[in-house]
Image: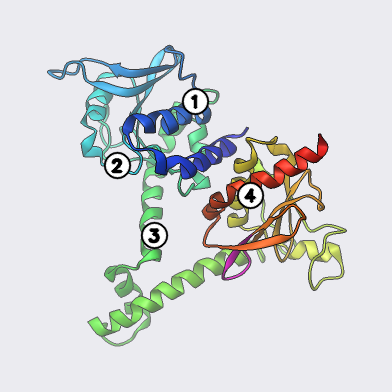
């Protein structure tokens, strides 16, 4: 499996099991060790690759332990400190990471609660761990843009120099994105005042700011939606289909001859009107991650149309697994019963697909049973 599929598979597991995890030790066993083993590709039972409870004397601190040390090329390269699932990650609560960072060869430190993984290095001062991460992976809301960088830390593709060279940009781009996301969700007073002062000609009083708070929130949401829906339509001329990530490109096709596309009699013209969005790609990856425990992901394909994004078993229209109805204000996930009747379930984001993992697996199992 690609690293994308491995990450989404673990994300599915975290979503399904985190409510049952009550201790730090259980978090390590259920989520952190699978992350090290499945996602990063290290053998967690081989002490030459993964050292649990790694110990090094640090000044007057004798016998302090780091949860895991990852070894590559015979040297400790990555330190991992784990907290209980759901516990907020505060770097001040992991002082041993700071101390061990200064006395080992490790250039990357990871602080995690099993769902969120924060990656640190020494951008600000040599051999002194930064106080802010350069990379954040949240398995509750996977950002696909961080996965290529995460791939550089896997055992098979370990490229520390490349990661560190990009760390500065990753750190600040990531922080800016998180600030923007927070402002789009709930605009701050400064954000509202910034825009109000540029479009409102009179003094921006507290009453005006209050009125503009709703307007800024509404405008932000509309702007994002318009960008997603119209991206590349004009940039690519007649071919309005955006390039897909390499990890899913082979699994997605757009409405071709034989596919039903509403309002267009010519299939060739219809295909050019289809725009595959980032949310549809994310939804496709999530469905693949859910069913990959039951079937080879290469047998899970997709065909995008103007009205919905179809996910198919063996790229067969008569074997639908799910449909993503994302080209509307209210998103829906289409799931199928034994008679292939579709039931559209309202969802808020692609991440909600995980809540319907059982029915998706049941659909795939039914197709497999008919082959037996």
Q: CA distance from mark 2 to mark 4?
A: 34 Å
Q: Compared with residue 102, is residue 192 higher up or lower down, i.e. above or below? A: below
- Is-magenta flag for residue 303? no
The colour style of the image is rainbow
Q: Name which residue lies at 53% across and 58% down.
A: 349
Q: Is residue 115 visible?
A: no
Label 4 SS: helix
Indicate which disc, 2 or 4, sits on the residue closer to the N terminus.
2
Q: Quadrant of residue 71?
A: top left
Q: Name which residue lies at 34% across and 76% down.
A: 213
The span picked out in magenta is 326-333
Residue that label 4 marks: 359
Q: Compared with residue 30, is residue 219 higher up or lower down, i.e. above or below? A: below
Indicate which disc, 1 or 3, sits on the residue closer to the N terminus.
1
Q: Whole-percent x and y of residue 297?
A: 68, 38
Residue that label 1 marks: 37
The residue furthest bottom is 202
Label 1 SS: helix
- Quadrant occupied by the C terminus: top right
Q: CA distance from mark 2 to mark 1?
A: 22 Å
- Is-magenta flag for residue 329? yes
Residue that label 2 marks: 89
Q: Name which residue lies at 58% across and 56% down.
A: 279
Indicate which disc, 1 or 4, sits on the residue closer to the N terminus.
1
Q: CA distance from mark 3 to mark 4?
A: 35 Å
- Quadrant occupied by the N terminus: top right
Q: Compared with residue 82, is residue 186 higher up or lower down, i.e. above or below? A: below
């Amino acid at each position: 499996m690609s690293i994308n599929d491995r990450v989404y598979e673990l994300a599915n597991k975290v979503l399904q099991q985190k409510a049952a995890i009550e201790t730090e030790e259980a978090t390590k066993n259920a989520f952190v060790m699978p992350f090290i083993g499945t996602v990063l590709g290290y053998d967690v039972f081989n002490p030459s690759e993964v050292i649990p409870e790694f110990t090094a004397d640090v000044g007057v601190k004798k016998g302090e332990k780091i949860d895991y040390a990852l070894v590559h090329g015979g040297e400790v390269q990555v330190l991992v400190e784990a907290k209980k699932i759901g516990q907020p990650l505060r770097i001040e609560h992991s002082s041993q990471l700071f101390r061990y960072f200064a006395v080992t060869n490790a250039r990357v430190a990871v602080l995690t609660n099993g769902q969120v993984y924060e990656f640190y290095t020494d951008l600000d001062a040599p051999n002194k761990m930064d106080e802010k991460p350069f990379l954040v992976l949240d398995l509750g809301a996977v950002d696909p843009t961080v996965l290529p960088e995460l791939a550089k830390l896997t055992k098979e593709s370990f490229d520390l120099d490349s990661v560190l060279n990009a760390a500065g940009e990753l750190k600040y781009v990531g922080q800016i994105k998180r600030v923007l996301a927070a402002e789009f969700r709930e605009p701050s007073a400064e954000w509202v005042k910034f825009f109000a002062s540029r479009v409102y000609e009179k003094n921006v009083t507290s009453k005006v700011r209050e009125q503009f708070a709703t307007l800024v929130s509404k405008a932000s949401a509309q702007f994002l939606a318009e960008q997603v829906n119209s991206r590349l339509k004009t940039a690519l001329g007649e071919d309005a289909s955006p390039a897909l990530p390499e990890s899913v490109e082979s699994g997605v096709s757009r409405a071709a001859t034989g596919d039903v596309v509403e309002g267009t009699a010519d299939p060739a013209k219809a295909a050019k009107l289809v725009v595959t969005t980032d949310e549809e790609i994310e939804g496709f990856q999530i469905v693949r991650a859910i069913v990959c425990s039951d079937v080879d992901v290469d047998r899970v394909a997709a065909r995008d149309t103007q009205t919905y994004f179809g996910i198919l078993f063996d790229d067969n229209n008569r074997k639908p697994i799910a449909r993503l109805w994302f080209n509307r204000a209210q998103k829906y996930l289409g799931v199928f019963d034994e008679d292939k009747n579709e039931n559209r379930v309202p969802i808020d984001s692609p991440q909600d697909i995980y809540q319907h993992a059982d029915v998706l697996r049941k659909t795939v199992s039914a197709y497999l049973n008919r082959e037996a």
